Image: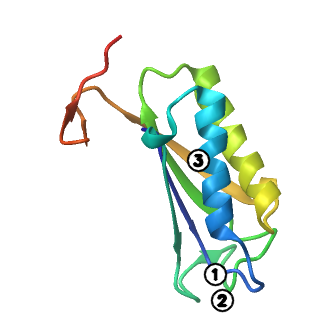
Amino acid sequence: MPLIRIKSLPFEQESKVAEAVTSLSHAVSDAAKIPLHHIMVTWEYLPAGHYAHHGLVVNTQPETTHPLLVDLVAPNFNTEAQIAAMLELIAHTISEQLPIEKNNIFINFTPAYSDGVYDEGHVVEWDL
């Protein structure tokens, strides 16, 4: 854990999403001192025409509208400063890797609770 789920419209030009997902995994691992095997990042494309922003529907991902939608799920023991740092790191890494403005990324944090996560074959309990 953490789990980072990203949704966007398809990019009009060729974009290196696989490289961005890998870079994001490494960046979070390095910054949070979490082993890489605990970091999960997914990227899904919304179907063209299935995302309205400001009442407008488009078919491909604009750089400055229709924000990327990112969900960050991480343990609830993280401090507000650690959460803020992860949010900033995610936005910075994505905007450096892909044609999307940093201010066009929406990230929502959802806390995961001890005994509320099933991973690696068992219910996980935080050791605090």
- Residue at 65 percent across and 69 percent down: it is 17
Residue 83 point in image, percent of width and height? 59, 30
Spatial CA span between label 2 and label 3: 28 Å
Residue 94 point in image, percent of width and height? 72, 56
Query: 92 left or right of 122?
Result: right
Amino acid under label 3? Ser
Query: Closer to the camera, 107 or 89?
Result: 89
- For label 3, the SS is helix
The crowd level at tag 1 (other Cα within 10 Å; few <14, some 14-19, many 20+) is: some
Amino acid under label 1? Pro
**Image mark for residue 123:** none
Q: Which residue is mark 3?
A: 25
The crowd level at tag 3 (other Cα within 10 Å; few <14, some 14-19, many 20+) is: many
Q: Which residue is mark 1?
A: 10
- Residue at 72 percent across and 49 percent down: it is 91
**Image mark for residue 59:** 2
- For label 1, the SS is loop
Amino acid under label 2? Asn
Farthest-out residue, left: 122
Q: To which quarter of the image does residue 31 belong?
A: top right
Query: 91 left or right of 44?
Result: right
Q: Is residue 63 above or below residue 23?
A: below
Residue mark closest to the camera, 2 vs 3: 3
Residue contact at pointers 1 and 2, CB within 8 angstroms: yes
Tell which circle, 1 or 3, labels the residue nearer the N-terminal end: 1
Spatial CA span between label 1 and label 2: 8 Å
